[in-house]
Structures are given as C-alpha cells and as structure tokens.
Image (cartoon, rainbow, N blue to C red):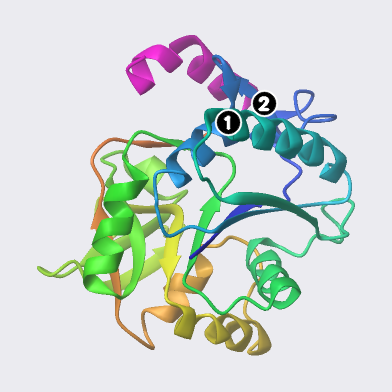
C-alpha cells in the first residue's frame, strides 16, 4: 500500500500564517500538523511508501521536513515507510492541478499499481487510522471515513453521505445546500488498486479536479463504496482564528 498526503494547496484563507509556510507544516503543540498524520500512517504495517505531493512554492520546505522526519524515524530503529516529496510544478491558485489532479499526477509519476491511501495534509483527526485500515482490509471495498456532524451549517461545507445498514454509500454530495444526513465524509480515503484507473476516467470526462470529495461522489454511482464510521472528530483548519483555537486546545483535543 502507498500513502499519499495531499499538500499542494496555498491556504490563502490563513494568510499571513501561510505566506511562507505551507499549512501542513504549521505547528500544533509540539509538532507540525503533518507529523500527527504521519504518526498515524506509520501504525499501518502494509504502507511501504509515503508520498507528499506539494507545489513548487513549498517543495523545498517539505524536503527539509522529510529529511528531518526520516532522520528521527531512523533513530527509533523501527522499520518505517520511506518518505518522498514530489513537486507538482504549480506556483499559485491560477495554475494549480487541484486535489484530484494531483492524485492522478502522482499515480502517473510513480506508476502506482497498489492499494492507495489518500489523506489531506491539513486535517487533524482523533480516530485511529489503523482502525479504518482494518475495516478496509476486511471489506476490500473503496472506503471513506464518516464522522457524525450535527451542525447543519458545517455540513454544508463538507461532503455528506447517506449509508445503508451495511455502511454502503447510497448517496453522496459535496457541499450540499440541503444535507440529507449528519454523516460527514472527510478527506481520508482507501482505494483498491483496481479503482485507480477510474480516477483518469473521472478526469477525462471533464469533471472537476478540485476538492477530493468530488471523486467518491462520482465513484459510488459506478461501484460499491463503503464508509468507516469513525469515533472522534476531524478538524479542517481553515482560518487564523480556527488555527489559534486548535493550538490553544490541542492537549484536550488529542488527550495529551
């Protein structure tokens, strides 16, 4: 299995914090956001490589982070996945590839023919990624992460799913004006290797390359997609105020 971290955004809503620092490298407590994600990825035994896709503006900063992270991992003596940073060549929001465009870019660049875990580099979560992986391996179907959200206004900003009694997706919409349920889908996905060619099909049909939730919204109408109902929460840090709140309360959020 390959793990892909999406980190090619410019996070303009967080300016001035992200003018010179990519959002995933902003500190939350003792470490960067991306380190919380990599800590969870490293609990999954099948992951052989972690790929971080970023843009040309921030590639050097991620290279430094990856070098430091690799050195720290090596010092533990554990056998852990390699980390590779890939620059998608874009420079700003006017020429960005979009999240789904970046996924296809990485699939092509690395000729990926493995199960693929995709995760946003700016989402902090409290559930255990290993539990979602175990669910995926048991079901062997493309798997989304589902979290209960009761705030309707928040649901309007997310992907919202309707699930049957077996947790199969029977409806999924990105940022619906009228959410059909309280089941929010966040940007963590496990895709079977046989599903990967369908990402190219999705793009070739002229669908949006932007938010990663658009692809599973298209995919579930073509094949079975299931959702892992995760306990806990997922936090998308979108504003300076939101970031400050997370920094002030990270010990309570993560129980540390």
Pointer 1 and pointer 2: residues touching (CB < 8 Å)?
A: yes
Quadrant housing residue 29: top right
Q: Viewed as shown, does residue 239 lie left or right of 151? A: right
Residue 8, percent from left and from top: 73, 51
Q: Which of 65 and 25 is in front in this view?
A: 65
Q: Residues within 10 Å of mark 1 (few under 14, many from 20)?
A: many
Q: How crowded is mark 2: few (under 14 residues within 10 Å), some or many (20 or more)?
A: some
Q: Viewed as shown, does residue 186 lie left or right of 215? A: left
Q: Viewed as shown, does residue 76 lie left or right of 54? A: left
Residue at far top of view: 248
Q: Does 214 lie within the magenta span?
A: no
Q: How many labels does the image show?
A: 2
Residue 32, percent from left and from top: 61, 26
Q: Which of 243 and 22 is in front in this view?
A: 22
Residues under labels 1 and 2: Cα distance?
6 Å
Q: Does 250 lie within the magenta span?
A: yes
Q: Is residue 133 above or below residue 207?
A: above
Residue 118, percent from left and from top: 52, 59
Report which residue position mark 2 lands on.
26
Q: Which of 90 and 244 is in front in this view?
A: 90
Q: Viewed as shown, does residue 75 lie left or right of 87? A: left
Residue at horizontal 53 percent and vertical 15 percent from the top: 247
Residue at horizontal 56 percent and vertical 50 percent from the top: 81
Q: Nearer the viewer, residue 253 or 1?
A: 1
Label annotation for residue 33: 1
Visible in this render: residue 196?
yes
Q: What stretch is highlighted in magenta?
A: 239-256
Question: On the rendered image, what quadrant is the C terminus found in?
Answer: top left
| Dominant SS type (magenta) | helix
Question: Element type at marker 1?
Answer: helix
């Amino acid at each position: 299995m390959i793990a892909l971290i999406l980190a090619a955004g410019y996070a303009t809503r967080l300016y001035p914090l992200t003018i010179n620092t990519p959002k995933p490298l902003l500190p939350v407590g003792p470490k960067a956001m991306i380190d919380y994600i990599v800590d969870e990825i490293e609990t999954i035994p099948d992951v052989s490589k972690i790929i971080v896709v970023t843009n040309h503006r921030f590639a050097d900063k991620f290279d430094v982070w990856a070098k430091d992270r690799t050195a720290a991992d090596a010092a533990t003596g554990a056998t852990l996945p390699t980390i590779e940073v890939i620059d998608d060549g874009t420079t700003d929001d006017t020429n960005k590839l979009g999240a789904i465009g970046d996924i296809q870019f990485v699939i092509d660049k690395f000729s990926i023919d493995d199960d693929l875990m995709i995760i946003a580099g700016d989402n902090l979560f409290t559930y255990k990624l290993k539990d979602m992986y175990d669910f995926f391996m048991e079901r062997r179907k493309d798997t989304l992460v589902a979290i209960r959200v009761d705030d309707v206004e928040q649901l309007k900003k997310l992907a919202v799913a309707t699930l049957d009694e077996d947790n199969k997706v029977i409806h999924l919409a990105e940022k619906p004006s009228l959410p059909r349920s309280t089941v929010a889908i966040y940007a963590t996905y496990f895709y079977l290797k046989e599903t990967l060619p369908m990402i190219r099909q999705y793009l070739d049909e002229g669908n949006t390359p932007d938010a990663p939730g658009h692809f599973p919204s298209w995919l579930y109408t073509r094949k079975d997609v299931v959702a892992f109902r995760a306990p806990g929460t997922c936090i998308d840090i979108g504003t300076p105020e939101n970031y400050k709140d997370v920094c002030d309360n990270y010990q309570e959020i993560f129980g540390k």
